[in-house]
C-alpha cells in the first residue's frame, strides 16, 4: 500500500512536535560539481536548519524532546563520540527548553578528543555538563543508564533521547516527505539519494520513499558504526516508526542499502578520499562538509561516479547532514598548517 503526500502529512501532524528549526531546508543545485562529475547533483541542505549550526539531529529533537517535555523531564542524558553533532544540537536544544543536559562523551582519538574544540566547545558554551570517557560504545551506554539512575535517585526526572528510536525515524519520514515534495515541485526525479547514515536518518528516508511509492534508491554510507548491525537496526527502528504513524508499510533489513566500503580505518578517522571530498566541495561549491559523516558519503558518491555505478547524466540527491563544526578539530588530518 502507498500513501499520498497529504495522507502522510496528516499522520505526521498527529505526532507531538516542538518547533526548533527552520523548515523546509533548501534543495540546492550544485552546478560546478555536477559539471565535473557529468551528473546532475542536487543537495538537500540539512546543514541549514538554522539551529545550533545545523545538522540532521535538530529535526529529530523536534519530536523526541516534545516527548521529553510531555514526560516532565528536567535533565537530558546523552552520550556519543566527543565530537558528536548529536550532542552539540542536544546541548543547544536543552538550553532552549531550560533543561539540564549531561553528556558522557567517548574519546575516539584518545587524548586529542579531550581538546576543547569544534562540537565539544559548543557543548560547553551551551552549558552542558560534560564528561569524556575512554571506553567502548557498550560500556558508554551502561554509563548513561547509571547516570539516569543517579538523577532519579536524587529526585530528578532524567530522559535519555537515544532510547527513543521510533521518533527520530518519524522525523526523517517528515524529512523524506519534505524532500520528495520539493523534488516534485522542481520537476526532478532523481534515481538515488546519498546520505551518511547508520540510524534514524536513512531509516526515515527509506520508510518515506516506500510509503509514498517513490522510485528512488536511498543509499546510506556507514560512517563506521561497527558496533551495530546497521541494516537490522534501521529496519527495526523504521518499523517502530511505521507503527507509530499507523502505516501498513514495513522495512526488512534486506531492503536497506547501506555501504560500509568508505569509512576506512574506522569511525571518526578521515580517509584520503574523504579529505579530497571536503576540499572538492569547498573549492567547487563553497560548501563545507564534515570529516566524520558527510565527507565519507561524498567520497562514496564520487567513487561510484568514477566507477560508473552512477551513470553519466544521472540525477542524484546528496543529503548534507551537517557536522561542519568538527572540521575545526581536524586541521592536521586536513593537511593544513597550524599557522600561516
Ligand atoms: C553530520 C551527521 N551526518 C549523519 C549522521 C548519521 O545520522 P543517523 O544517526 O541518523 O544515521 C550523523 C549522526 O550523528 C551526523 O552527525
Image: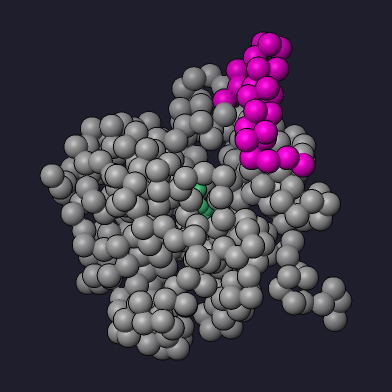
In the image, residue 118 sits, relative to residue 171, either above or below, namely below
Is residue 142 shown in magenta? yes
Q: Is residue 184 left or right of residue 225?
A: left
Name, please, the residue furthest toward the right. 339
Where residue 74 sits: x, y (%)? 61, 22
Can the viewer see residue 95?
no
Total numbered labels placed on residues in the image: 0
Q: Position of residue 298 (x, y in %)?
A: 50, 71
Q: Residue at x 20, y 51 (%)?
A: 212
Q: Is residue 235 above or below residue 281?
A: above
Question: Which stretch is magenta?
Answer: 134-159
331 or 302: nearer the viewer? 302
Q: Quadrant of the N terminus?
A: top left
State which quarter of the image contains the C terminus.
bottom right
Residue for point 38% across, 31% down: 16
Is 107 positioned to the left or the right of 339 in the image? left
Residue 227: x %, y % from top left = 57, 45
- 294, above or below 103, in the image: below
Front residue of 219/173: it is: 219
Q: Which residue is rendered at x = 71% and y = 73% of the image? A: 334
Q: Residue at x 69, y 29 (%)?
A: 143
Q: Residue furthest left?
A: 1
| Principal secondary structure, stretch drawn in magenta | helix
Q: Quadrant of residue 248?
A: top left
Residue 111 visible at all: yes
Residue 136: quarter of image: top right
Residue 334 located within the stretch drawn in magenta: no
Q: Position of residue 223 (x, y in %)?
A: 55, 57
| 212 lies left or right of 218 | left
In screen coordinates, is 195 left or right of 111?
left
Amino acid at each position: 500500500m502507498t500513501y499520498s503526500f497529504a495522507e502522510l502529512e496528516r499522520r505526521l501532524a498527529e505526532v507531538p512536535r516542538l518547533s526548533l528549526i527552520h523548515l523546509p531546508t533548501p534543495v540546492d543545485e550544485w552546478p560546478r560539481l555536477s559539471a565535473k562529475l557529468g551528473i546532475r547533483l542536487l543537495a538537500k541542505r540539512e546543514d541549514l536548519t538554522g539551529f545550533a549550526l545545523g545538522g540532521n539531529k535538530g529535526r529529530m529533537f523536534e519530536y523526541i524532546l516534545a516527548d521529553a517535555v510531555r514526560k516532565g523531564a528536567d535533565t537530558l542524558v546523552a552520550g556519543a563520540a566527543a565530537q558528536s553533532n548529536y550532542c552539540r544540537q542536544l546541548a543547544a536544544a536543552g538550553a532552549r527548553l531550560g533543561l539540564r543536559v549531561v553528556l558522557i562523551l567517548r574519546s575516539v582519538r584518545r587524548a586529542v578528543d579531550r581538546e576543547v574544540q569544534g562540537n565539544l566547545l559548543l557543548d560547553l558554551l551551551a552549558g552542558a555538563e560534560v564528561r569524556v570517557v575512554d571506553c567502548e560504545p557498550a560500556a558508554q551506554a551502561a554509563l548513561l543508564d547509571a547516570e539516569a539512575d543517579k538523577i532519579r535517585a536524587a529526585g530528578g526526572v532524567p530522559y535519555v533521547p537515544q532510547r527513543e528510536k521510533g521518533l527520530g525515524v518519524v522525523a526523517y519520514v517528515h524529512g523524506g516527505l519534505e524532500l520528495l515534495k520539493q523534488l516534485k515541485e522542481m520537476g526532478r526525479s532523481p534515481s538515488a539519494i546519498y546520505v551518511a547514515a547508520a540510524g534514524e536518518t536513512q531509516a526515515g528516508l527509506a520508510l518515506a520513499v516506500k510509503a509514498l511509492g517513490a522510485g528512488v534508491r536511498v543509499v546510506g554510507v556507514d560512517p563506521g558504526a561497527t558496533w551495530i548491525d546497521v541494516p537490522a537496526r534501521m529496519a527495526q527502528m523504521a518499523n517502530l516508526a511505521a507503527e507509530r504513524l499507523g502505516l501498513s508499510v514495513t522495512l526488512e533489513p534486506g531492503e536497506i542499502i547501506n555501504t560500509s566500503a568508505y569509512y576506512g580505518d574506522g569511525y571518526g578517522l578521515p580517509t584520503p578520499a574523504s579529505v579530497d571530498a571536503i576540499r572538492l566541495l569547498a573549492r567547487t561549491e563553497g560548501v563545507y562538509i564534515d570529516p566524520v559523516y558527510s565527507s565519507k558519503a561524498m567520497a562514496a558518491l564520487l567513487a561510484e561516479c568514477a566507477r560508473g555505478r552512477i551513470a553519466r547524466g544521472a540525477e542524484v540527491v546528496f543529503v548534507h547532514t551537517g557536522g561542519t563544526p568538527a572540521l575545526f578539530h581536524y586541521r592536521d588530518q586536513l593537511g593544513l598548517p597550524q599557522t600561516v
